[in-house]
Image (spheres, helix red, strand yellow):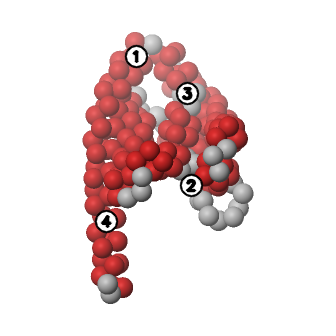
């Protein structure tokens, strides 16, 4: 088969995996995220103190941590095997998790707008926490990051050590998430105090 024809086949497979995997993930995660968002908005409306302390909840660590070290593709390929089907399932699960985490935030922000300063801090918090996911996904660079170590340990079937490394990865993400979350919380408190 000519090289150009193979590239076209790869492109078609890539587009097919993206449309089916990401589309199904956005649909499932978006619907569940919307329902969760409505529940949270009702809870926040009922209790202002609960809403303030909810700023500290590390949902970013949960979302990014679940997809960070390429665990989903490794598990899926182990159970299902290699191929487009595994890629679609892996992508679908990852996008479902992200949509489920971020969709409620849209509804919450609409009902309870944040100041520009607090929004900026929230963005920095997301980027720093998400950087752990991006670094962990950078497998094959020989950098010794936790994602690469976890991948190697799973391939060697050293599951206990892989689980310990995964917990360390979550801890590193949680540190950024909570540290910046505290800043976000007190910034919110200061904005509320200045408007009273």
103 in relation to 133, above or below: above
Q: Nearer the viewer, mark 3 or mark 2?
A: 2
Q: How far apart, in angstroms, are the residues tagged by discs 4 and 2?
A: 21 Å
Q: How far apart, in angstroms, are the residues tagged by discs 4 and 1?
A: 43 Å
Q: Nearer the viewer, mark 4 or mark 2?
A: 4
- Reading the image, the residue beneath label 3 is 57
Q: How far apart, in angstroms, are the residues tagged by discs 1 and 3?
A: 14 Å
Q: Nearer the viewer, residue 82 or 171?
A: 82
Q: Nearer the viewer, mark 3 or mark 4?
A: 4
Badge number at residue 43: 1
Q: Nearer the viewer, mark 2 or mark 1?
A: 2
- Compared across the picture, whether 75 is left or right of 25 comes to right
Secondary structure of the residue carrying tag 4 is helix
Secondary structure of the residue carrying tag 1 is helix
- Reading the image, the residue beneath label 2 is 137
Q: Quadrant of the N terminus?
A: bottom left
Secondary structure of the residue carrying tag 2 is helix
- Compared across the picture, whether 23 is left or right of 100 comes to left
Would you say residue 111 is visible in this rendering?
no
- Residue drawn at (34%, 79%), measured in percent from left and top? 6
Answer with mark 2 or mark 1, whichever residue precedes in sequence.
Answer: 1
């Amino acid at each position: 088969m000519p090289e150009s024809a193979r590239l076209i086949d790869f492109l078609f497979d890539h587009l097919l995996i993206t449309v089916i995997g990401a589309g199904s993930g956005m649909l499932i995660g978006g619907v569940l995220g919307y329902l969760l968002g409505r529940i949270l908005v009702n809870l926040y409306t009922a209790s202002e103190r609960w809403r303030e302390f909810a700023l500290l909840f590390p949902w970013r660590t949960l979302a990014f941590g679940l997809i960070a070290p390429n665990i989903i593709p490794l598990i899926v390929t182990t159970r299902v095997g290699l191929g487009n089907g595994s890629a679609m399932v892996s992508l679908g699960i990852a996008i479902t998790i992200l949509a489920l985490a971020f969709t409620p935030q849209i509804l919450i922000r609409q009902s309870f707008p944040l100041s520009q300063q607090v929004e900026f801090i929230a963005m920095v918090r997301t980027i720093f926490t998400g950087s752990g996911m991006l670094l962990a996904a950078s497998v094959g660079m020989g950098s010794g990051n936790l994602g690469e170590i976890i991948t190697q340990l799973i391939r060697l079937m050293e599951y206990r050590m892989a689980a310990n490394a995964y917990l360390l990865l979550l801890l590193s993400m949680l540190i950024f998430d909570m540290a910046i979350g505290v800043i976000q919380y007190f910034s919110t408190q200061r904005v509320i105090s200045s408007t009273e």
